[in-house]
Image: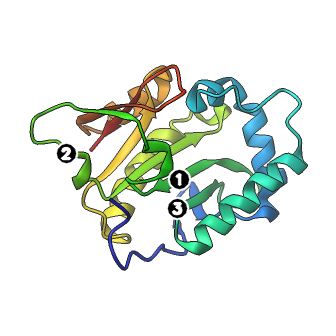
């Protein structure tokens, strides 16, 4: 199913320690620095080998142009996570509709009989810069996201999706008390994703 009808993406969010706003191509350099610092985490997160060691700012800008366009069209939403001074990218948050193309042919297994992918109103992915994991930024972001998705987006059934092989993300999500609702195996990817709600 697509996003709920009439879904409006908030302009962003500011809380102590971080802020979120829609990502733009102008964020290419800040985002690239975070991506390259975190590439050993992002490769299993993506399950595609991205980013390559020689991934450039120009290539990143082209990627961000696509994300910015998709956001403006309401097809999916991407937010950059920044420090309070807006000088350092701390990570990214992505909201995908449950009927996104990546789920075409995916093997989605419910964890309990009452869990139905058709009831999910958004699939939420996130990553946090490698150097900020020790500071607990991933857990802070998750707590902020839960309230923001409910209160500002009106999403009651968002699923937070993390790769099974990225232990820090799994631990961060499980520390919030969210329940495993689905396992997701996308076509052409070697590992599973875990969806919590």
Q: CA distance from mark 2 to mark 3?
A: 21 Å
Does residue 134 show up? no
Contact between marks 2 and 3 (CB within 8 A): the answer is no
Q: Is residue 181 above or below residue 3?
A: above
Callout 1 secondary element: strand
Provide the residue designation for mark 1.
94
Measure the C-alpha gap from mark 1 to mark 3.
7 Å
Relative to the observer, which residue lies in front, 13 or 98? 98
Of helix, strand and loop, which one carries label 2?
loop
1 or 2: mark nearer the eye: 2
- Which sits earlier in the primary sequence, circle 1 or circle 2? 1
- Say which residue appears at 33% left-offset and 76% top-offset: 5
Residue 196 rendering spot, x and y as whole percentages: 30, 39
Left or right, 37 with respect to 2, comes to right
Q: Quadrant of the C terminus?
A: top left
Q: Residue drawn 66% across and 54% down? A: 83
């Amino acid at each position: 199913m697509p996003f709920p009808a009439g879904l409006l993406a908030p302009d962003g969010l500011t809380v102590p320690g971080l802020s979120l706003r829609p990502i733009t191509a102008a964020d290419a350099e800040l985002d690239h620095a975070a991506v390259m610092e975190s590439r050993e985490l992002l490769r299993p997160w993506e399950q595609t080998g991205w980013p390559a060691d020689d991934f450039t700012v120009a290539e990143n800008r082209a990627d961000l142009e696509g994300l910015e366009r998709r956001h403006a069209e309401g097809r999916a939403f991407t937010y950059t996570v920044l420090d309070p001074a807006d000088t350092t990218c701390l990570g990214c948050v992505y909201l995908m509709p449950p009927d996104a193309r990546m789920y075409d042919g995916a093997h989605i297994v419910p964890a309990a009989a009452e869990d139905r992918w058709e009831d999910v109103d958004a699939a939420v992915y996130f990553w946090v810069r490698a150097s900020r994991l020790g500071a607990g930024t991933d857990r802070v972001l998750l707590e902020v996201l839960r309230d923001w998705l409910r209160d500002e987006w009106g999403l009651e059934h968002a699923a937070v999706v993390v790769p099974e092989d990225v232990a820090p993300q799994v631990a961060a999500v499980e520390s919030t008390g969210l329940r495993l609702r689905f396992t997701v195996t996308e076509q052409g990817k070697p590992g599973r994703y875990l969806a919590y709600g």
